[in-house]
Image: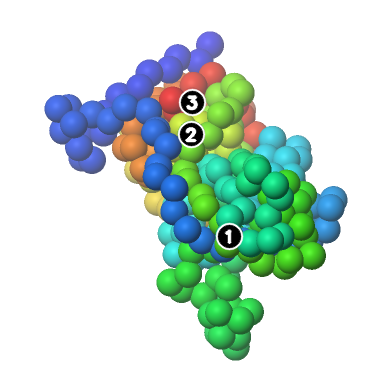
Amino acid sequence: MVVTSVQSSPSAYSPASKPSGFQPSAWSLAHATFYGDESASDTMGGACGYGNLFNNGYGKDTAALSSTLYKNGYACGTCYQIRCTGSPECFRGSPITTITATNLCPPNWSEDSNNGGWCNPPRTHFDMSKPAFMKIANWKAGIVPVMYRRVPCMKKGGLRFSFQGNGYWLLVYVMNVGGGGDIGGMWVKGSKTQWISMSHNWGASYQAFTSLGGQGLSFKVMSYTTKQTVVAMNVAPPNWSTGLTYQSSVNFS
């Protein structure tokens, strides 16, 4: 059975300032484009490392973020409400769609930031999947001004931990993250070890350079935004294997 708890991280904040669950942000201005076609097949993979977005629960409503929003991968998994505004190509009523950040929209310094280099810093930009873009505007517009805000990620079930690596290097992709959707710190504990700090690799992955084979594994995960820490005990059995994904019953609020 998975034993779970939520606790503060003593190195991150004092008990008096223990954060609550993630709250929506204020609305801000940005621009949005789209990539791929109606199938959203071109959104598979991506800089966050989520692999097949359909199989892993992210679906078609996703976006690549400009580096200003992407924050070196710490924004992977964050959720946003987006609505088109100030353009004749916006749909009537300015409908809202909710997307998850799953990719990076890299800078294109060969193009002017206001004419093709839409994701060049310091621009805040969403390169949405075409199905998500088509919920807010006429896709023939190409690019539209939008209003956006961070919102809590509503997930079913617990955090998922996808294992890669080898006998001396454990690489873990964290998926299905609720609350703020983001990960700012992570620790692993073998059944024969104390808590071991993991370093950020890229996207939504964290790594530990240690031998943990033959041990049951538990994880402690800290939200990048709220600093809330979730502990999931006994996530993987002693005979765990790379290439598999293990699910806990705990998530962020």
The amino acid at mark 1 is Gly
Q: Mark 2 points at which residue?
A: 152
Alpha carbon distance from label 1 to label 2: 26 Å
Report, in whole angstroms, how far the alpha carbon at label 3 lies from the one at label 2: 12 Å
Circle 3 SS class = loop
Name above or below for residue 9 compared with residue 167.
Answer: above
Q: Which quadrant: the C terminus?
A: top left
Q: In the rendering, at what x and y percent does residue 160 appear?
A: 58, 32
Residue 117 seen in the figure: yes
Of residues 241 and 136, the one drawn nearer to the viewer in this rendering: 136
The amino acid sitting under disc 2 is Pro
Q: What residue type is labelled 3?
A: Asn
Location of residue 60 with respect to 119 vertically, above or below: above
What is the total number of numbered labels drawn onto the structure image? 3
Which residue is labeled 3 in the image? Answer: 251
State how far apart marks 3 and 1 are (Cα).
Answer: 37 Å
| In this rendering, the label closer to the viewer, 3 or 2 | 2
Q: Dot 1 lies on which element?
A: loop
Q: In this view, does 229 lie above or below 118?
A: above
Q: Where is residue 207 in the image (x, y as percent from the top left)?
A: 47, 49
Q: Residue furthest top?
A: 1
Question: How busy is the neighbourhood of tag 2: few (under 14 within 10 Å), some, or many (20 plus)?
Answer: many
In the rendered structure, find residue 86 and report the number of the disc placed on it.
1
Q: Which numbered mark, 3 or 1, is in the foreground of this view?
A: 1
Residue at disc 2, secondary structure: loop
